[in-house]
Image (cartoon, coloured by chain):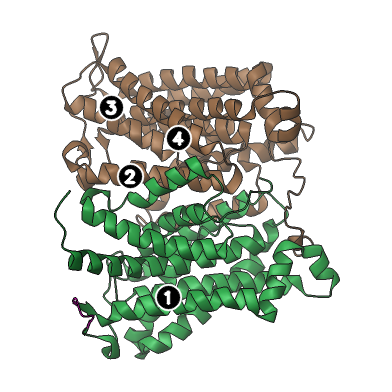
Amino acid sequence: MPHVSPDYLLIQIFNGLVNGGFYALLALGLSIIFGMLRIVNFAHGAMYMLGAFVAYYGAELLHLPFFAALVVAPILVGAFGLGLEVLLLRRLYALDPLYNLLLTFAIVLIVEDAMRLAAGALGSPYATPDLLAGATNLGFTEYPTYRLFVIVVCMIVCAAVYFGIERSRLGARIRAATEKPELTRAFGIDTSRLVSGTFAFGVALAAFAGVLAAPNTNVTPTMGDTVIINTFAIVVIGGLGSILGSVVAGFALGVIAAVGAVLYPPIANTLIFIVMVLVILFRPTGLFGMAERTA
Amino acid sequence: MIAGRRGALVGAALLAAGLVLPFVPGVYIVFAIDLVCFALVAVAFDILLGFTGLLSFGHALFWGGAGYVVTIAIARGATSFPLVVLEGVAYAFVLSLAVGALSVRRSGIYFAMITLAIAELQYFVAFQLTDITGGENGLPVATRGTLFGLSLENDHVYYYLVLAIAAVATTLAIRIVTSPYGAVLAAMRENESRAKSLGYDIERFKLAAFVISGTLAGLAGALYSVGNRLAGLDAIDWHTSGAIVMMTILGGIGTIYGPMIGAAIFQSLDFFVSKTPIGDKTNIVMGLVFAIIILIARRGIVGELMHRLRPSVVLPFDDEEPVLDNPILEGHA
C-alpha cells in the first residue's frame, strides 16, 4: 500500500464528496421516479447531459449566468421530461415495467446522437462563475471554492427534497400515492398529476446536477453515459426506491471510490461495481431497500 | 413456428438465404460475417429473454469478453481455430455461471440493472489492462488460424464456416427450447409461483438458461472478433448490450428465427444510415425505430406477422395481463 499523507487523503475525501453529490442527486431523482412510477429511467444520464448543455448554450448564446442556469435548465429539461411522460411513457404503464426501461433506453440513443449531431462529439468547457472561482483555505489545504460549493449545494438540495417528502403536505400525498394508490385516489387526490409531476421533478433534479457538473467537466453529449451506469449501481446498493438509501449510498460511494483510488489507483473505475456485487451477495434488496413485490 | 415442419421450412429458408448472401450485389463479405454473428447472438439472447422473461442488459459481457479472450490467445501465438474458439466459449461459460448465480436472485428491472453494471465492470477492467487488451486501441487479430489444416484467412471460407457453426448452434438452441426443459422455462415465465408450487427449482432453471445464453453469446462474439480481426472496447460497452436487446425485440421475442431476422434488419439499417449525411450518428434512427417497436409493435416484426397469420399462437409477454404492482398507474395509462 502506498504511503499517503493524511492531508492528501482528506483532499481526496472532499473530491469524493463532490462526485458523491452528483451521484446522490441523480440517484435521488431515479428513486423518486421509481417509487411512484415503478419505472427505471434509463434516460436520467441523458437529462443530466441536457441540463449541462442548456447551461452551455445559455452562456454562449444569451450570456445566461451560471446561477440563472441553475434555475432555467431544470425548468426546461423538466418540461421536456413532462412531455415524454405525457406523450410516451404513459402508454406503457399497464405493461411490464421493462418496456419503459427499453423506451427510455431508446430515448437515450436518440437524444445523445441528436446532441452529437448538433454540438459535435468533442467537449466544450464551461467557465466557473467568477463568484466561485479561486480557492478557499480549509486549514489543511487550499481547496477549489467551486467544488466546496457543489458539495454544500448537493447536500442542501438532498436534505430539502428528503424533508419535503417526509414532512410537507405534497410529500405526504406522494408517499400516500406510492404506498396506497387506490385509497389516495378515493380521497379525491388527482394521482395522475402527481405521477407526471414526480417524473418531471426527478428529471429536473438530473438537469440541476448537469448544470452543477458543467464547470467541473467538459460538456459533451456522452457525459451522461458513465454517470448513469454508476448511478444504477448506486441505487442497487442503496435500495431502489429508497430516498434515504439513494442519498447515503451516493455520497458514500463517491467517497469510497475516491479513497479506494488513492490506496489502489487501478480500482478507481470499478470499485462502485465491486461494492454492488458484494451488496447483492449479502443483501440482495440493497442496504435500505424493501423486498421487491413483483417482476 | 419454431417446432415442426413449418419451423424446419423457415429454418431451411434462412439457411438458404445465408448461403446466397455473399453473392447478393452490394453485400461486403465482412458485413455478411458480422450479420451471421449478430444473428447468432440474438438467438442466444432470445433463449434468455424469450424463454425465461429475464432481460439482460449486459450480454456484451459474453459477446465482447469471449472476443477478447480469443484475440489474446491469438496474440500469444495460438493458431488452432477450434482451440482458440473453445477458450473464448469456456470463458463465457465460466463467466455466465458466476454472473448468473449472482443476478438470477433478482428479476425484472433489478436483473437488467445488475447485469448492466457487471458488464461495465469488465469494460473498465479491459480498459485498464492496457498491456493485455491494448486499451483504447483494441487488439488486432494477426491470423484467423487454421481448421484441421485449412487456412481461414480467405473471407469466403471463413464466412461459410461461421454460417455452418451458426446453423448447428441455432438447431441446438431450438432443440433446447422445444424440449421438456424449455417447457418448464415457459411455464416459469408465464406463472412463476405456479411452477414453483409444482416443485421446480426456479433459480436453477433460470441459471441454466442464463448459462446457455451467455455461452452461446460468447461463441458468437468469438467468431465475430476473429472475423473482424479485432477485439475492441466498443464490443464490451453497454451500447452493444443494448444493440443485442434491440435486435432481438425488433425481430420478435421468443421466436428464435425472429431475432435472427431482427439482427439482419438492424445491421442492414445501421449500414445504410451510416452512408447518409447522418454518418456515425445512426442511433438517432435505430433509437426511433426501436421506440416505435416498443410503443406499437411489441411482438416484433416476425411476432406481429405470426400474430396476423395465426392469432391462436401465443407468444411470450403476449397475454399481457397488466402486471401493475402499482395501481396508481391504472386509468392513468
N-term-proximal mark, 4 vs 2: 4
Please say whether residue B303 is one of the residues in the magenta stretch.
no
Question: Label 1, label 2: how many angstroms apart (C-alpha)?
Answer: 29 Å
Local crowd at mark 2 within 10 Å, few (<14), some, or many (≥20)?
many
Mark 4 element type:
helix
N-term-proximal mark, 2 vs 3: 3
Q: Are marks 1 and 2 on the same chain?
A: no
- Residue located 32% across and 65% down the image: A16
Question: Label 2, label 3: how many angstroms apart (C-alpha)?
Answer: 16 Å
**Is any atom of residue B29 visible in this view?**
no
Q: Which chain is brown?
A: B
Checking the image for residue B70, the label placed there is 3
- CB under 8 Å between discs 4 and 2: no
Q: Which residue is identified by label 4? A: B99
Please say whether residue A140 is one of the residues in the magenta stretch.
yes
Mark 2 element type:
helix
Mark 1 element type:
helix
Classified by dominant secondary structure, the portion drawn in magenta counts as: loop
Chain of the residue that carries numbered disc 2 in the rendered image: B
